Image: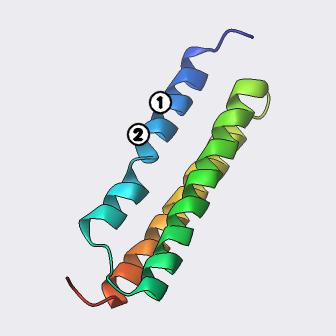
Amino acid sequence: MRELTLLETGCLGCMLLLSLVLPLMMSLRAPRAAALRKSCLQSVWTGQIFLAVGALAVLLSADVAFYATFLGVAGCVGCALLLHRQLRVAPAL
């Protein structure tokens, strides 16, 4: 395994912290309806997959580390906005 630079380590740390956002958003205001819950969980998993692919790309290649981080963070932020919209429409508990 290759050594990571300080920037790559920071990118991984940023993505690690960002990976907590979607599950916390879902747990704070989860809808009761099964169909809404399923679509919200799909948004959470999609955001987590974006971050996981970005983190793997950072670990495997130094050349694409910045772009992979940007892709992972942008995908997660997009899923967070979508999840926020889905939870806002869902009836309160």
Is 72 situated above or below 31? Answer: above
Which one is in front, 34 or 23?
A: 34
Q: Using a 10 Å C-alpha cutoff, classify the residue at mark 2 as few (fewer than 14 neighbours), some (14 to 19) or many (20 or more).
A: few
Q: Is residue 77 left or right of residue 1?
A: left
Q: Is residue 45 left or right of residue 84?
A: right
Identity of the residue drawn at 47% across and 37% down: 16
Residue labelled with disc 2: 17
Residue labelled with disc 1: 13
The image quarter in which residue 6 lies: top right
Q: Is residue 65 visible?
A: no
Q: CA distance from mark 2 to mark 1?
A: 6 Å
What's the residue type where badge 2 is placed? Leu
Q: Is residue 30 visible?
A: yes
Is there a contact, CB below 8 Å, between mark 2 and mark 1?
A: yes
Identity of the residue drawn at 56% across and 60% down: 45
Secondary element at tag 2? helix
Secondary element at tag 1? helix
Residue 90 point in image, percent of width and height: 33, 88
The image quarter in which residue 80 lies: bottom left
Residue 82 point in image, percent of width and height: 48, 75
